[in-house]
Amino acid sequence: MKELRKKPVETPIIAVTGGKGGTGKSTVAVNLAAGLSARGLKVMLVDVDVDGPSCATLLGVRLEGGEEVKTFVPKIEASKCTGCRRCVEICPEHALVGLQGQVPKLFEELCSGCKACQLVCEPKAIENGWKKIGNIYTHRTNGLGLIVGELRPTEPRSPVMARATVMKALEELKTHKYDVAILDTAPGVHNAVAQPLWVADLALAVTEPTPLGTHDLNFILDLARELGLPAEVVLNKADIPGGLREEALRLARERGVEVVAEIPLDTELLRSYMAGEPLVKVNPASPAGRALGALIQKIESRLKGGEV
Ligand code: SF4
Ligand code: SF4
């Protein structure tokens, strides 16, 4: 499968992902980006968790402006429509409904913008219509660039928005020099998660030692394997009371995946989260700060050695 993925840019891309939600994925991504940036690397952090992006908040960055992301929706010109129903029959989302001889009705919220209806419409009755599905924000500071994709509330098309955010990041990487890009993915194992993994060179799967954490870790490692993407594990809340640390480590071992960091439970991490400042900046000597610092050092030396 590996040949399916082509490296789109020279810059190394690390996707921080993880299956289950709430494992601390964004916290790891933000701390990794801030830590590498503090060590002199030019870093781009990309928030591809488009249903609920949090990287800007965790960095204390206020997002302004933003460019609109639009997708195609069919606009049917009634005077040209013969009511043949070809568009209704081809629509994979069942977004068009109509009887023979009628102008089909569009249920816009179901439309994925694939344009299949337009392609099959012989009388060319379907024109280009557009709808806004979200915004992409770009913020640059010295050494740390931030790109955030945000889906409009009630919009169901997170894979389309995730794709647009990834494309924007690749465009930025082609025009500006960065040493590394860190992509914070959505939780879960679905198309919106696959979009950033598709362009990555390494996946860091952030999990926690709970039944659901280990269960979902298997799925995200399966997805990475299907994409031919090297993956490693970050075990967050590693010492959670009654946790399944040994089981998580055994799972990683059995799958031949390295556990590159174990981050202990630490109230300082929560404090930094609430304050909107990365822990590695405000309290690097705390237990979680030290674990994150060791991870940053490891990734930095691999980046400098060209191993990512
Ligand atoms: S394919 Fe074109 S002509 Fe046929 S029903 Fe759809 S819009 Fe009308
Ligand atoms: S663009 Fe695709 S999903 Fe939308 S109505 Fe046309 S065929 Fe259906």
Image: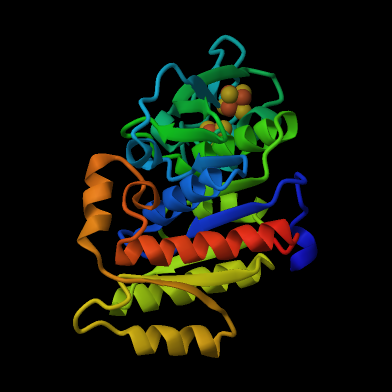
> Which of 41 and 276 lies nearest the eye of the viewer?
41
Quadrant of the rendered image containing residue 239? bottom left
Placement of 182 over or under 82, stated as above or below: below
Taking 96 as reference, is 228 above or below it? below
Where residue 119 appears, as percent x and y from the top left, is: 70, 31
Asked if residue 184 lies left or right of residue 279, the reply is right
Residue at the right extreme of this rendering: 3
Q: Compared to 62, does 154 lie above or below?
A: below
Where residue 105 sits in the image (x, y, percent)?
44, 26
Q: Is residue 4 left or right of residue 114?
A: right
Q: Answer yes or no: is residue 146 visible.
A: yes
- Quarter holding residue 301: bottom right
Q: Is residue 45 above or below residue 21?
A: above
Residue 129 is situated, as x and y percent measured from the top left of the image, at 55, 18
Which residue is at the front of the view, 158 or 197?
197
Query: Looking at the picture, how far across and down is residue 1, in whole percent?
Result: 74, 68
Would residue 107 be visible to someone looking at this image? no
